[in-house]
Amino acid sequence: MKNKKKREWHKENIVSIDFDGVLMQYNGWKGANATRKPMKGAREFVLKLIETGYKPVVFTTRKPPVVNAWLKRYEFPKIEVTNTKHPSVVYIDDRCVKFDGSYAKLTRDLKKYDVYWRKKKTKIFSKLFSTKANKK
């Protein structure tokens, strides 16, 4: 087994950025190769990160060749694409809830949580906090 060098993420200043819904417009899964236009300001944001000494890394479940082709098509700088969760300065994602050490606050946050692009009227965790689920 080769001796892999550990990443020094704190020296690299990695900023992990989700692809779907953060860099690329998104309104639900349409297939592994289906892509849309960039979010307004996404390219400029990535360029600003690089300019100020951060290393943007696309963190996605998609295949890297699909994302790399998209980045090239929309003239983004060449950046790393991975499905490996590297230790990062920050993770930017449209599907995240920040945990701050309090499960009471996490529960309140989950009750109101939803993604900005979702069109349904009910919240994602509405079943989890319904009175039926609590009686079981």
Image (cartoon, rainbow, N blue to C red):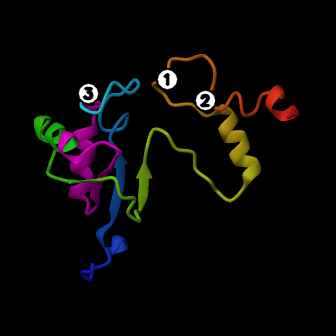
Badge 2 marks a residue whose secondary structure is: loop
Image coordinates for residue 41, horizontal then vertical, percent: 27, 35
Q: Looking at the figure, which quarter contains the N terminus?
A: bottom left
- The amino acid at mark 2 is Ile
Measuring 76% from the left and 33% from the top, which residue is drawn there? 129
Q: Which residue is mark 1?
A: 118
| Contact flag, marks 2 and 3 (Cβ < 8 Å) | no
Q: Which residue is mark 2?
A: 124
In this view, the mark in front (2 or 3): 3
- The amino acid at mark 1 is Arg
Which residue is situated farthest in the front direction here?
A: 1
Asked if residue 122 lies in the magenta stretch, the reply is no
| Contact flag, marks 1 and 2 (Cβ < 8 Å) | yes
Q: CA distance from mark 1 to mark 3?
A: 18 Å
Please tell me which of labels 1 and 3 falls first in the chain.
3
Measuring 43% from the left and 44% from the top, which residue is drawn there? 93
- The amino acid at mark 3 is Ala
Where 42 sits versus 131, above or below? below
Badge 3 marks a residue whose secondary structure is: loop
Please tell me which of labels 1 and 2 falls first in the chain.
1
Per the rendered image, the range of residues in magenta is: 37-66
Badge 1 marks a residue whose secondary structure is: loop
Relative horizontal placement of residue 47, taking residue 16 as reference (left or right)? left
Measuring 25% from the left and 63% from the top, which residue is drawn there? 53
Q: Where is residue 132, by image quadrant?
A: top right
Q: Which residue is mark 3?
A: 34
Q: CA distance from mark 1 to mark 2?
A: 9 Å
